[in-house]
Image: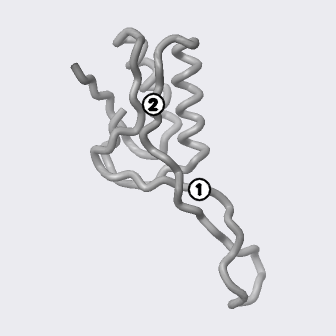
Amino acid sequence: MKSCKAGRISYQAIEAARRIISREFRRNGQIWVRVFADIPITSKPTEVRMGKGKGNSTGWIARVVEGQILFEMDGVSLSNAQKAAALAAHKLCLSTKFVQWF
């Protein structure tokens, strides 16, 4: 799967897409997750005064550039891989497309 636009993906979306793909493969084939959520997102609680430092970490995101490969799949048929990629694309917050390498 390849990204069509630049953006951000949360760690929950990456894990949800990975689970969908592995569930579709039923333990056949391999999956490589090529994107890693390594940027922390912080926020301060509501009604807290200014100052006193940065807020607590609330989650993690990954920055994605246009054309970056998000997931690689191997060991399954082409139709099965396309179906899994279509299901996983619904879990991601940016547009993707299926790319086949020979």
Q: Position of residue 46 (x, y in %)?
A: 75, 76
Mark 1 packing: few (<14 Cα in 10 Å), some, or many (20+)? some
Residue linked to disc 1 = 60
Going by the numbered disc 1, the residue's amino acid type is: Trp
Task: Locate the N terminus by quadrant.
Answer: top left
Q: Is residue 61 above or below residue 92?
A: below
Question: Closer to the camera, 16 or 87?
Answer: 16
* Sequence-first tag of 2 and 1: 2
Q: Secondary structure at mark 1?
A: strand
Question: Closer to the camera, 87 or 51?
Answer: 51
Q: Position of residue 86 (x, y in %)?
A: 43, 25
Q: Is residue 82 above or below residue 60?
A: above
Q: Secondary structure at mark 2?
A: strand
Write the residue at 49% across / 47% down.
36
Write the residue at 42% across / 39% down.
34
Task: Tally the numbered discs.
Answer: 2
What is the residue that sits farthest to the left in this orientation? 102
Going by the numbered disc 2, the residue's amino acid type is: Trp
- Spatial CA span between label 2 and label 1: 19 Å
